[in-house]
Image: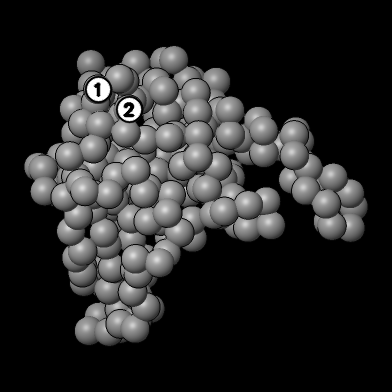
Amino acid sequence: MSQTMLSMKLEKPLFYKNKFALRFELGPTDISVWADSKRENINEEYFRVASNRAASIYRSAFSQNDEIKVCYQILSDGRQKIKKSDYFFKLFCKLSGKPIVFSEHRDIYRDDLEYKRYCIKRVTISDVYTQDLNEDEVILALINSDFGCRGPSLHGQLFLINCTKGLTLHIYDDRGMDIVADSKKPLESIYHEQNSSLLDYDRDYMDRLFALT
């Protein structure tokens, strides 16, 4: 594991677990998720806007030839495991042959969890570069996480760790995306380029963070 990965807290909500962080709004608030009042039909315009925003932010954070680690994890009560048959491996099938590590993490204790029983099951693929990824397919699978009816979806937590720039990106669902780093510098250009997509609820924190000298 790189020092970049070890120093960042890979746990939802990523934005609140890390000091240097950006949170973006993907799903537009002025467009309904549903095309009808009965909530029977998906409004594709909503998802088109969310996907386009996610792709734009991703391309501000990841450049050609950046080295990446792909990290996927699930919360397990000890029985659930990440299997080779999971959609994650189909989505990243082009990375077959890359170094892959399965690991288990128990540093997630909270009052509502039984420490000795619950853990995070994680798989990490290393030696990946930006051009190895089909970011549009990855974004679609994450945007669909709560709407499997739209197509293939990922239900665990996926983190794209940019080892070159020292930042981590996480799309938590159709509503939003977090990007965190060990310092302010890797996030500065993203903050300015994608300012209009920052989540207003947390904008004050982000504005104060980047106003500091």
Residue 9 seen from this side = no
Q: Secondary structure at mark 2?
A: helix
Q: Residue at x 31, y 20 (%)?
A: 63
54 versus 5 height, above or below: above
The residues tagged by marks 2 and 1 sit, at their Cα atoms, a distance apart of 7 Å
Q: Residue tagged by mark 1?
A: 65
Q: Assess disc 2: are there few (<14), some (14-19) or many (≥20) residues with their C-alpha within 10 Å of its C-alpha.
A: few
Q: Amino acid at mark 2?
A: Gln
**14 horizontally vs 9: left or right:** right
Left or right: 69 with respect to 197?
A: left
Q: Residues within 10 Å of mark 1 (few under 14, many from 20)?
A: few
| Front residue of 9 and 157 | 157
At which x and y percent is residue 93? 36, 49
Amino acid type, callout 1: Asn
Tag 2–tag 1 contact (CB < 8 Å): yes
Whether residue 72 is visible, yes or no, is yes
The quadrant in which the C terminus is found is top left
Q: Where does label 2 land, which residue?
A: 131
Q: Disc count in the image? A: 2
Q: Residue at x 41, y 23 (%)?
A: 59
Q: Position of residue 187 (x, y in %)?
A: 31, 24
Q: Nearer the viewer, residue 134 or 1?
A: 134
Question: How has the structure been colored for display?
Answer: one colour
Secondary structure state at the residue bearing disc 1? loop
Query: Image quarter for residue 35?
Result: top right
Residue depicted at x 58% and y 28%: 52
Quadrant assignment, res 166:
top left
In this orientation, which residue lies closer to the viewer: 130 or 181?
A: 130
Q: Position of residue 8 (x, y in %)?
A: 21, 46
Q: Position of residue 174 (x, y in %)?
A: 58, 45
